[in-house]
Amino acid sequence: MIVKINNKKYTATKGQTILDVAREHGIKIPSLCHHPDLDVRASCRVCVVEITGRQKLATACSTELEDGMEIYTDSSRVQKSRNLNIELIFASHIEKCATCTLRFNCDLLKLAQEYGVKIARFPDRKAKRKTYKFANAVEIDGSQCIDCNNCVEACHNQGIDFLKISGHGHEQEIQPVKAKGSACIYCGQCANACPVAAAQEQGEWQQVEAALKNKKKIVVAQFAPAVRVSLGEEFGLPYGYNCAKKINTAFKELGFNYIFDVNFGADITTMTEAEELMERINNKKAVFPMTTSCCPAWVAYAEFYHPELLPNLTTARSPHIHSAGAIKSYFAKQKGINPKNIEVVSIVPCTSKKYEAARPELTYKGKPLVDHVLTTREFAFVLKKNKIDLAKLPESEVEPMFNDGSGAAAIYGASGGVMESALRTAASLACAQKKTKNKLCVSRLEFKEVRGLKGFKEATVDLAGKKVRVGVVNGIAHFEALLPKLSKYHYIEVMACPGGCLGGGGQPLPTTNAIRQKRLEGMYAIDKGKTKMRRAHENQPMVEYYQWVKNNKLASKLLHTKFKATNK
Amino acid sequence: MAKTLNILQKIEAAGLVGRGGARYPTAKKWSSFAQSLKNREIGYIVVNGAEGEPGIKKDAYLLAEKTEAVINGVYLANQFFGNDKIKKIYFFLKHEYHRDYSKKIKEILDTKKYRALSKKIEFFIKPESPMYICGEETAIINIISVRRAEPRLKPPFPTQSGIHNHPTLVNNVETFYDISLVGADNYEGHRLYTLGGAVKHRGVFSLPAVMSVREVLQATNNYPDFDFFVMTGGEVCGELLRSDQLQAPVEGSALVMVFDKKKTDLKKLLAYWLKFYEAESCGLCSACREGSYRLRELSQQTNYDKQLFIDLLDNLEDSSFCALGSSLSLTVKSMMENINKK
């Protein structure tokens, strides 16, 4: 069909909205509450347009095109309504811009500036609103909320339903539900859907800045697999662009003493986890399926909602905890540094890692293994605040004692990546165990059946003759459907966030399914590029460290963890 | 001849329109519902007795005085759309109406003619707040579907996808009453007017559906002999008219309310409206949630920014999600333009 937008003709197909077609053709229609992966709610009224023959203005996000429709996106009526709605929303949001991590990327602030919105005509009305804090990971600051409901929907889409709107009208407020059977799992999908950082991570960047200024501290940085393919988005680099080596330089610019890569830790995780998988497979009394436990939101979910499954969780710690252990033990010893003076800062795509880092069992010599956790968003904010343009930085390398991990580590941040990494190593371990009897044991390298953005993926794989059934839960909302048939599997990966860590709650805004796909492609490209080291156990420095841990009987202190039920 | 027509054809011939106030042709709604049911297993019917507009008492009158006729209208609908297809029929009632009339409704449902129908009838009490939007059909669908009390985007229309995503027909109590009359070939083209305020004869009157304010006042012997103005439509969602503007037709919820000019404090009236709208906003859209709040806030300031006040009204009229926002604007503007300026 043919429609007219601002007197120019465009072709559209049935079912497309005005906003779809406008965006397709680069016609600017501002919006605030619209998120491509969430239901259209049309609540902010910022995307209003004028349609010939209609009495009221219409919202472009919710109005499907009809043949012959004539639309005006910037008429004086539209301007008047749009600007006033932006002003009303701006007045309902207490600006905390000075310390807000979204400051450089805030749609509301941009709209207010772009449309010259008057900011002093209405007094603040939400100054006394509460902030709800969920552990040390996520918070919802009611004084910043603009009532779009995106957080509630994101939480609902995770199957958690921990958030609700209470009350109505101007008094309504987003609140956690008080029901006993409900708990936040700290995944941060609410924060990822919030356009104005009312739902956000609990910031730690101020502590990190303070640590960097403290001359007595050796401050080290490490960054997770998913950060390298997303941080660039904040600096105008293409989606999925691998900016790992620029990140190394950025750390140096900020004054970190040593730079590490969590990918090295991911290889430790793979080794630990693959060994445990093989042990379970060779032990007739073992509990199956073994599940991954590197996603702290999944751990929080299991501990609260399914404590009966805690014996199924692998005891392998998660990658940044593993690499922090390597830094505070092995690296500190080699360098002659007192580990108590080391502050480890992890940059992660995740909000639940903040909660994980504070877990009492994950300490070393009386101090947390990881001292501070920043999300990708927080880190981007710190860089911008310090006027460091990541895109323009030269490349540099990590601390040479460790390295930037194998190809298997690179895909850890994609749903199915942990599974694939563990299978690569488990297949080799299985072959090695079998080799004495049979010389023809080929271990597979790629397990493409567990890749991609489907909610649940499964495969039967051959580990040196043993058929192993594996499944991958991509997004915690898909876990419950698996429960009845769980016993059919040997090994299950669970990532709470859709897409895995690349779609994590701490990732840049916006995160959409289309953007997840691009980040995913970026990760698998890194794996492909690691031609000589695509399996964790091929990472020589990691193997040396791993051996050192075992020789010194430090496995329980540095490799394994435990869990406990939280719903009592 | 008339006997060969089915109820839908009769409704169409009678030109029935929805009595919730939006005047949508009933036959069109029914046809759309029937069309949806063709490809679907089940559907729902809702009898809307939410009556959220203050001052309107017509549903109460019908539930009290014409109970069987209302039920008969529901019976005809169930029969027409198919007893097998209609899974449930909800009587969605304001709390007081449920308290006062559900017993009588149940007694009639317990008679032989309606016993089969009664099995699928369920009473649903309208939530206390926000009360206004809870009478809007898509909000009713949300409430019955255990979702938040707020309007839904259309399309899909309720007749396509309503309660639990099944086709749903929502008709007003008065519409079912009219349907009963149409079914018995007794429909005379009347509707129910509520007369209130400073009139001699308050109450609900059955009069021809299209009438001017003056005609309604005269026909009910209520034409004032003092200086007055009227509110027509609804008590808060309506229009204020001067005594020289009475040729306007009575629309909306068919209220005609007379104000004694000398005894009426317009500021108080405005404050009442603004408070009502602020309290009744469901909170979904920024134009109404924030707009109604800021209008009330502005109106309480001395020397408030009059242009901003008008801009907020214009914005509600142009960009609010549902009709409540627009009616706030129309109502307040009618006072500014029809009464204050003169």
Image (cartoon, helix red, strand yellow):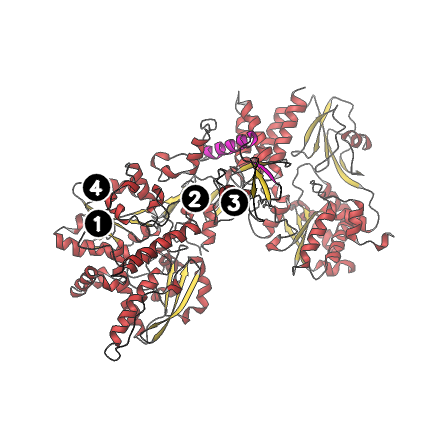
- Which residue lies under the disc numbered 4? A255
Of A146 and B116, nearer the camera is A146
Say the numbered circle drawn on residue A38.
none
Q: The disc labelled 4 sits on which kind of residue?
A: Gly
Dot 2 or dot 1: first in sequence order is 2
Residue A473 horizontal/vertical position (percent):
41, 61
Q: Give the range drawn in magenta.
A: A69-91
**Residue B155 lies in the magenta-colored region:** no
Q: Which residue lies furthest to the right in this view?
A: B1
- Which residue lies under the disc numbered 3? A20
Q: The disc labelled 1 sits on which kind of residue?
A: Glu
Q: Nearer the viewer, mark 1 or mark 4?
A: 1
Q: What whole-number distance in Å separates the C-alpha atoms at marks 2 and 1?
A: 35 Å
Q: Which chain carries label 1?
A: A
Dot 4 or dot 2: first in sequence order is 2
| Circle 1 residues within 10 Å: few <14, some 14–19, many ≥20 | some
Say the numbered circle drawn on residue A194.
2
Q: Kindly indicate whether the residues beneath marks 4 and 3 are on one polypeptide chain.
A: yes
- Which residue lies under the disc numbered 1? A397
Q: Nearer the viewer, mark 4 or mark 2?
A: 4
Q: Are marks 4 and 2 in contact (CB under 8 Å)?
A: no
Q: The disc labelled 3 sits on which kind of residue?
A: Asp
Q: Which of marks 4 and 3 is in front?
A: 3
Q: What whole-number distance in Å separates the C-alpha atoms at marks 3 and 1?
A: 43 Å
Dot 1 or dot 4: first in sequence order is 4
Of A102 and B101, nearer the camera is A102
Q: The disc labelled 2 sits on which kind of residue?
A: Cys
Q: What whole-number distance in Å separates the C-alpha atoms at marks 4 and 3?
A: 45 Å
**Residue A80 lies in the magenta-colored region:** yes
Q: What whole-number distance in Å separates the C-alpha atoms at marks 1 and 4?
A: 15 Å
Tell me if A282 is positioned left or right of B23 in this view.
left
